[in-house]
Image: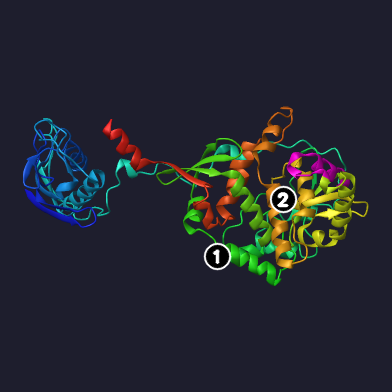
Amino acid sequence: EMIEVGCEDQKLAFKLQGYISNANYSVKKCILILFINHRLVESSALKKAIETVYTAYLPKNTHPFLYLSLEIAPHNIDVNVHPTKHEVHFLHEDCIIESIQKHIESKLLGSNSSRTYFTQTLLPGLSASVSDVKVSNSSSADPSERVYAHQMVRTDSKAQKLDAFLQPVSKPSLAPKTTSPPAPVQATAELDDAEMLDAVDGLEPGPSKELELDSGPVQSETPPRKRPHVEEDKDDLTAACTPRRRVIKLTSVKDLRNEISEQTHKGLQEMLQNHSFVGCVNPQWTLVQHHTKLYLLNTTKLSQELFYQILIYDFGNFGVLRLSSPAPLYDLAMLALDSEDSGWTEEDGPKEGLAQYIVDFLKKKAEMMEDYFSMEIDEEGNLTALPLLLDNYTPAMEGLPLFILRLATEVNWDNERECFRDFSKECSQFYSIRKQYTLEAEAADSSEAEPSWQWKVEHVLFKAFRSLLSPPKHFSEDGSVLQIANLPDLYKVFERC
C-alpha cells in the first residue's frame, strides 16, 4: 500500500525522498513523519498542503500515512520558530511545498490503475448480485492534472450581459438631415459581408451620421458588427461597420501599419481578447479579469491607442459624423486660446490674429483632410463633419476647440508620413475617453436618453479592444496595465491567517 516518492529541484535547492500511502490505505488521523536534513521536525504548512491533495482520493474523515525525508540547504532553514526547535520554516516555503504537492499528485494518479471501494450493505428485501466489496479498474480515468481551488477560473470571457442588448434609445436630432438617404444600407443589413459589398459598390462613400455640437446623440444607421483580427476581413468593413471604398497603397500608411504590428505585445493582446469585464472605477480606470488575475487598465490610454490604430488601418475609408450646426473654426480657435491648456502667452501675439491664421491654414488643408479623414471644412471656414471611427461612439465635444488648435500647431504638414501619424495622434486623443470631459457630461440632464459613459466603456470600447486593438509593448511598462491581484497569492495570504 506504499508508494515511493522522490524529486529534486536545483533552482529551489531541495531534494525529497520517502514513502506515501496510496488511495486504498487510510487512517483516522494524518500521520506525517518528516525529516529535514536528517532531523525529525514538524511543518504544519507542508502537512496541510499534502492533506489537500489526498482529499480528492480518500473518503471523508480519513487521512494518509507519509514518511518523507527532505534535504534543504542549511542556511535556508529557520529553526527559531518553536522553543524546542521542533517546528521549522524554510526559504521559498510556498514554492517548495507546491512542487511537493504536484509530485505527490502525479504519483497518486500513476498508482490509480486499481482501486477498492467499500459500499454499504444493501437493505433486506432488495435483490442484488454484488458483494460488499467492489473492485473496479479506473485506468481509463482522465490523467490530466487536477485543478486546485486557487488555480480555478470561475468566469467565462465569452459570456455577455443582458444590458449589452438594451442600448438606450437616443433622443432624435432636431436638425434636418442633409446626408444621402441611408435606405440602401439598411436594406442590406441582414446580408452577409460578401453580399453587402456587392450591394454597396454603387453607393456614395460611407454613410453619414447626425451629430449635435452640444454633445447631442447620434443616430446609428448600421447594425453593430465585430471586426476580428483577421487580415482578409479587414478589407470588408471598417471599425465603424461601414463598407470600404478603396484600398490604400501609400507607402507611408503601410509603414505606420507595420510599425503597429511590430510593436504589438502578444500577451496583452491575448489578455484583452479573452478578458472578463469587472467594472468601471472611473472614466480613466477599469477593472478586468483574465484567468486568475485581476487587472486595472488605463481606459484613456487604451482608447487613445485604439482610435489611433483605427485611423491608420481604416485610412481613407471613414464614415461621416455630420454636425447639425456648422461650427466656425474661428470661434473654436478663440475658445482654445482662452483655455490654460493652449499655453498661449502675450509673446505669441494677439489671439484674434492667431485664430484667423488657424482658420486660413486649415482651409488650405481641407481637401486633404476630407479625402483621407472625412473631416469636412466648408469655404466659409466652418467645421461641418468629423470622421466616424467607431459605431455607437461619439467624442466629447468639449475637447473640440483644443483639437482644432493642435491640428494647426502640432502636426508636421510638410512630411507625408509624419503628417498622417501626427494627425492620427491628435485625432485619437480627441476621441479617447477622458476624465475631465466625461465627468462634466455626468451632470447633464438625466432626462436625456443618451447612453451613460459606463455603458459605452463596457459595450463599445472594451468590445472594440477585444477585436481591434493591438496593444503596444510599452503598455506593460508605463502603468497602462496593472496587475492588482492574483488568486494563488490570495490563497497563500489567507492560509496564513
x%, y% of residue 386? 78, 51
The residue depicted at 92 percent of the width and 55 percent of the height is: 379
Spatial CA span between label 2 and label 1: 33 Å
| Nearer-the-camera pick, 237 or 408 | 408
Q: Which quadrant holds residue 125? A: top left
Residue 98 appears left or right of 482: left
Amino acid type, label 2: Thr
Q: Which quadrant holds residue 197? A: bottom right
| Nearer-the-camera pick, 194 or 50 | 50
Kindly identify which residue carries mark 2.
222
Question: Can residue 1 be found in the magenta stretch?
Answer: no
Amino acid type, label 1: Glu
Q: Which quadrant holds residue 397? A: top right
The residue depicted at 22 percent of the width and 55 percent of the height is: 140
Residue 165 appears left or right of 96: right
x%, y% of residue 376? 84, 54
Residue 327 appears left or right of 60: right
Neighbor class of circle 2 (other Cα within 10 Å; few <14, some 14-19, many 20+) is some
Labels in figure, total: 2
Q: Is residue 434 visible?
A: yes
- The tag earlier along the polypeptide, 2 or 1, is 2
From the viewer's perspective, is residue 410 above or below residue 448?
A: below
Which label sits in the foreground, 2 or 1?
Answer: 1
Q: Which residues are magenta?
A: 327-346
Residue 76: give its label: none
x%, y% of residue 263? 55, 62
